Amino acid sequence: MFGSSSIRRLISALMLLLSGAAQVTLAAPSHFEAAPLGFDAAWHLLVRTSFAASPADIEQFSRLTREQAVERLLSWTDKPRITPPPAWVGEPVTPLSRLRDMSVEARQAFQRNNIARGLEMRGWWLQEMVATPSPLAEKMVLFWHNHFVSSQQKVRQPQYLYRQNLLLREHALGNFGALLHAIARDPAMVIYLDSASNRKGQPNENFAREVMELFTLGEGHYSERDIKEAARAFTGWSIDGERGEFLFRPLAHDDGVKSVLGQSGNFDGDEVLDILLAQPQTAEWIVSKLWREFVSPHVNAADAAEVRRITSVFRDSRYDIRVALRTLLTSDAFYAPQVRAALVKSPVDLVVGTLRQFQFSAGDVAPFALVVAQLGQNLFSPPNVKGWPGGDAWINSTTLLARKQFLDRLFRSEALRPAGPAAMTAAAPSPTANPNPVAAMRQRLQRAYGEVHFDSERWLQQAGNEPAQVQRLALAMAPQQALPEGETRMALIRRLTQDPVYQLK
């Protein structure tokens, strides 16, 4: 169905669409700030912040002003998560001493169990993103997961990563300074960036380097000497391998004078973090990343003034993340016509957004985490400390073909049976029981495709049944490929979701 030449044409079409997006040209605040959003602006806001835009939500948000709409989104973020976590998350981690004493066979079984639990954890998070009444909160947890990167490949024990996920949830829309201090002591981060091996006389610079380059200042705003001196301040930051908790080891700490970013003193790690938070560049770095997440893939020269304005508000709020989001999502820049369809949907956006946008019912959503991984976004396992690069990097001949196959399979037949009680109870057992956990999850994915159901009649009735309205609900702009007249509504939906524009938001 999808030949190599057609995939190349689709990639070319996508790149052409993205390259045609003009820079944002900002003007003085417009009268639109006090006017109702209307359909298009409401759709844009919801898709960028909530994975999808249902007809009912668009109807409600279209009558609100920018400020009212954003306040409603932010109020939703206080809702608790609804998906129960895996049963094992409260278990203690396996002590390092026990790991060292294991036989080869026991260690292999331990590793298989951790792989299975990691798969289960990915499914749990994807299920929550599909079902959540607070999609912006999930968006922000994912944003911080890609900012403060840790990976199961190195951390290994999934309890650590689950606890880190809870930490990100706690601070996702709170205070960035508090989040920075908390993540620096997080056991998963301590393991991932080798803080446990950072000791007096033998400093390990990994955390000090990444906290400056990736977490706060951005590249070019510090020196190699700053990194070396900061690493000394973080000596002694470790974990208790028996209890799996952060532990400060005073005997391993360098208590001498350090010089970091022009300041000198007998600094410890927390004091270095405060020095970083005091730098104007830190707020601008965070805002620029939020800009690329929600507005445009690049911060161009024309955007710089607006980024500085939002940065100023963010700093004046003492790093209140809600304030930064509120300012960003109510700005003229966010609603500028030039930024519509300027972002490539991430694999999570595509999978979760499609399931939510078209209100699919499914007995077992968790296995679709494998699809997300196949498309290049393996939850809890970013490719490196810089995380997923996003943007154009999401699209290549392999991933675009996989995206189209996923969508084709979802919409192949609207007669697929709904996931009723029988299908729910027939879900495969936890992958922890299978000696090959990846194979077990793939089997669950095959069953999940059989259980998924799109009630096209119900959805089209909510959408208004008109082809033009269906198109407005599905795409961020006019389709790249001409739509033939006289098609059934279901054929129209399939054609729209196969159009290159559907890959954009």
Image (tube, grey):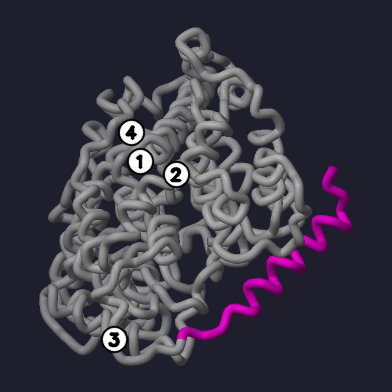
Where residue 115 sits in the image (x, y, percent)?
50, 30
Residue 338 relative to residue 417: left or right: left
Instruction: Measure how far apart labels 2 and 1 are at the Cα level.
Output: 7 Å
Sequence-wise, the earlier of marks 2 and 1 is 1
What is the distance, in whole Å, between disc 4 and disc 2 at their CAs?
Answer: 12 Å
| Amino acid type indicated by mark 3 | Pro
Callout 2 secondary element: loop
Q: Earlier in the sequence, mark 3 or mark 1?
A: 3
Vertical placement of 91 versus 76: above or below? above
For disc 4, the marked residue is 159
- Give the CA separation, mark 4 to mark 3: 47 Å
Asked whether disc 1 touches disc 4, contact meaning CB atoms under 8 Å apart, the reply is: yes
Crowding near the residue tagged with mark 1, few <14, some 14–19, many ≥20 C-alpha atoms within 10 Å: many
Picture disc at residue 380: 2
| Kind of element beneath mark 1 | helix
Magenta span covers which residues?
1-24
Q: Name the front one of labels 3 and 2.
A: 3
Q: Which numbered marker is on residue 161?
A: 1
Q: What element does badge 3 sit on? A: loop
> Above or below — where is 92 with respect to 12?
above
Q: Is residue 125 above or below residue 270?
A: above
Q: Crowding near pointer 3: few (<14 within 10 Å), some, many (20+)?
A: few
Q: Is mark 4 on a helix, strand or loop?
A: helix
Instruction: Tell me if residue 172 is in the magenta stretch.
Output: no
